[in-house]
Amino acid sequence: MVGNKEKSKEKRDKRLQEISLLRTIPYSDHQRWWTSETVAVVTGANRGIGFEMVRQLAGHGLTVILTSRDENVGVEAAKILQEGGFNVDFHRLDILDSSSIQEFCKWIKEKYGLIDVLINNAGVNYNVGSDNSVEFSHMVISTNYYGTKNIIKAMIPLMRHASQGARIVNVTSRLGRLKGRHSKLENEAVRAKLMDVDSLTEEIVDKTVSEFLKQVEEGTWESGGWPHSFTDYSVSKMAVNAYTRILAKELSERPEGEKIYANCFCPGWVKTAMTGYAGNISAEDGADTGVWLALLPDQAITGKFFAERREINF
Ligand code: NDP
């Protein structure tokens, strides 16, 4: 008898095969809304999924800015792609550092004027396997949630007004889901607040993460109903998911011709430094949905959560 684990492995492998095939189908001329002048920015792109998204986007003919918090490592990573003939530029960007964000925006303004795509990929996780330390909770929430929010806010004024809309893609995780197989969120009040998209506000999300951090400081978080594995990381991604919905709603109020579409996706469990290379898919497969979302010819998709090129529940 085939167990559930085997069944989901079979399903996943089948979908990955389908996606590998889909990736080989070139976009037709009428689908390609972009040109070599289209500018995409990817954060935390010196390695892993971010690096791979840069490679794939540049492969589709966009100009891609590979950013990294470490200048030397980023220059080297960009060089690999530049030597491969890709149109890739580099600039330093630490999403935790407001002066680095400002400096980056200034550079973009001077060199490119505006950008079309922003992929928020930079992130940290300090939990490995069943080790569920919350020791680095502040760093995890600051980077994954506040850092992502800060770079988005800084970049929105630099996003091009165009008929096809600019795009924001946030790399999050199924671990941040409010419902579903992987979610172990037992705090019903938090779930209800974050699910209620009509009344969801940034303040609610900020308060939720602050409450979590307060409980960590007080040593009471274990009875707070937060996810039991990868706790701080899951809370950070839950917050980014919620923020993506708020952002999409806000941005949808912009007039036609000035739209920005914001979505998020889970790359799967990917063999990168973050997982100690213990994932079950390659960075190439993990990057796929992000690239697909950034290039979607269909303009009206916003405020959604995706995995393996399919919409999933928050
Ligand atoms: P990596 O650890 O390989 O990459 C993370 C990247 O983020 C690195 O380039 C890192 O830079 C960068 N980064 C961290 N902090 C900052 C910062 N303050 N400013 C700028 N860059 C920063 O992991 P992945 O490629 O796996 O992760 C990419 C994204 O995918 C993350 O958001 C992660 O949460 C998400 N994700 C990954 C999954 C997986 O299974 N791998 C599953 C679900 C989501 P540096 O090299 O300097 O540390």
Image (spheres, rainbow, N blue to C red):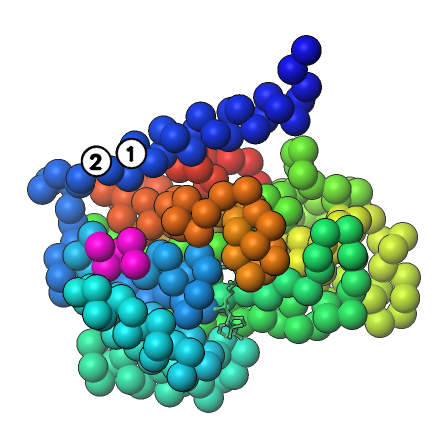
- Would residue 76 be seen by someone viewing this image from the given angle? yes
Q: What element carries label 2?
A: loop
The residue that mark 2 highlights is 25
Label 2: how many residues lie within 10 Å, few (<14), some (14-19) or many (20+)?
few
Kindly check if marks 1 and 2 are in contact, taking CB atoms under 8 A apart as contact: yes
Q: What element carries label 1?
A: helix
Using the image as rendered, state which of residue 86 and residue 252 is in the foreground: 86
- Counting every numbered tag in the picture gives 2
Residue 274 shows which numbered tag?
Answer: none
Across and down, in percent, residue 256 comes to: 23, 52
The majority secondary structure of the magenta stretch comes to: helix
User: For the residue marked with disc 2, what is the amino acid?
Assistant: Ile
The residue that mark 1 highlights is 22
Across and down, in percent, residue 143 comes to: 58, 70
Which residue is at a point 75% across and 44% down the rendered structure image? Answer: 185
Residue 237 inside the magenta-drawn segment: no
